[in-house]
Amino acid sequence: MDIATRLIHTGASVEPVRGALSVPLYHSSTYAQLSVDTFGTWDYARSGNPTRNALEEAIAGLEGGTVGCAFGSGMAATSSTLLLFSPGDHIIVCDDVYGGTFRVMTRLFSQWGLTVTFVDATDTANIAAAIQPNTKALFLETPSNPLLKIIDLRAAAILAKERGLLTIVDNTFMTPYFQRPLELGCDIVIHSGTKFLNGHSDVVCGFAVTADPDLGQRLRFVQNAFGAVLGPNDSWLTLRGLRTLKVRMEESQQSALGIAQWLYSQPHVRKVWYPGLPGHPGHEVHKAQSTGPGAVLSFDLDSYELTKKVLEGVKLMAFAVSLGGVESILSYPAKMSHAAMPSEERALRGISDSLVRLSVGLESADDLIEELDRLMNS
Ligand SMILES: Cc1ncc(COP(=O)(O)O)c(C=O)c1O
């Protein structure tokens, strides 16, 4: 079944008693049991909630997985996934990773004895060179945040399988609508569902999905044991957001392409990063592993003063943390998504003080361009 159809029908069967088309919202922390020997499907809401379960089935189905776990944030999904590993284990991470992921790995899991090596994973040889005897997994983001670097997921997954490693992919920017890492050989997909999956800037949530039954059981165990679960209300809102993922992604992507092309021709723009532009170094690899470049792009302006003027001057776009909402969001990685990264690390990765990230929403692309033009060129 095509993903457009699955977005409408997965995880949302008609409620059997009253025939509701919308999954009911179960605000119950516990469930009455009939016998001491046999508990029903639901016992306690940290372990399972029917509304959350519908959302988990939906995300698992969309990613081509068998188990989906919903968490209270994208970071809770990442952290819970990292709990699959043990002190002494080593993970290889792409260098241009979300700042919060960098922070949790280098400041929390490091205390717990997990070690990480950051590599430029756009070249699979760099990943191979970083493998140590205690390496257990690759943690990748493609396109990455904020420089939209592209990693060849098929090649990374083949290498990982040969060396007995898991491949974990943060698929937040693409969503399963454009890219499905499990189908490319990867083992676990992570999401900040706060972004495009929910899509309305009104929920913080996260997911981990796998097709492997053993990994699925282990993730479910961590979800219940560690307990960073998503509540029913946010599960319901996210289920509703998911229904329109296709139209939101298609529309925002079309505008993003137009804006990226316009930015590319601008005198005050030093560089544009968008995998949909043919000049992007990962353009071909991205095309081979996804069905679209998505709705996030970054650009570098020719001075800090102009960057500040644009960020502080927007009226239509929001100047805010986050991405993936129906409203366009302009953000400043150096002080927002990557503020948790020391400035030397940011500089090493090319995250300059004049870098701006734009998540394109559903406004008219012409209006968005007009706003940028006014701020950049007058
Ligand atoms: C790529 C990526 N992964 C993970 C996260 C963390 O998600 P959350 O903010 O929902 O915890 C973010 C948040 O910006 C992100 O951009």
Image: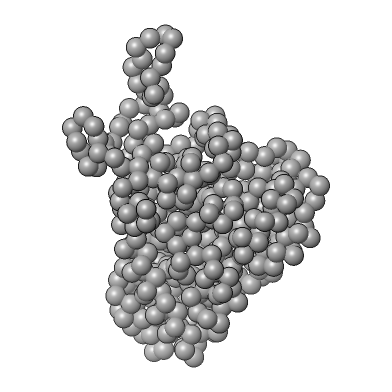
The location of residue 363, given as percent across then percent down, is 30, 71
The quarter of the picture where residue 300 lies is bottom right
Residue extending farthest to the top is 36
Q: Is residue 321 above or below residue 11?
A: below
Residue 207 seen anywhere in this rendered image of the structure: no
Q: Residue at point 80% right, 51% down?
A: 132
**Residue 157, picture quadrant:** bottom right
Query: Please, is residue 8 above or below residue 318 in the view?
Result: above
Q: x and y percent of residue 193 in the render? A: 43, 51
**Number of marks in the image?**
0
What is the quadrant of the C terminus in the image? Answer: bottom left
The spot of residue 340 in percent (x, y) is 59, 57
Residue sitting nearer the eye, 121 or 228: 121
Q: Quick check: 201 above or below 261?
A: above
At 74% from the left edge and 65% from the top edge, which residue is drawn?
125
Q: Is residue 180 visible?
A: yes
Q: Measuring from the top left, give residue 238's x and y in whole percent.
A: 35, 48
Q: Residue at x 31, y 31 (%)?
A: 27
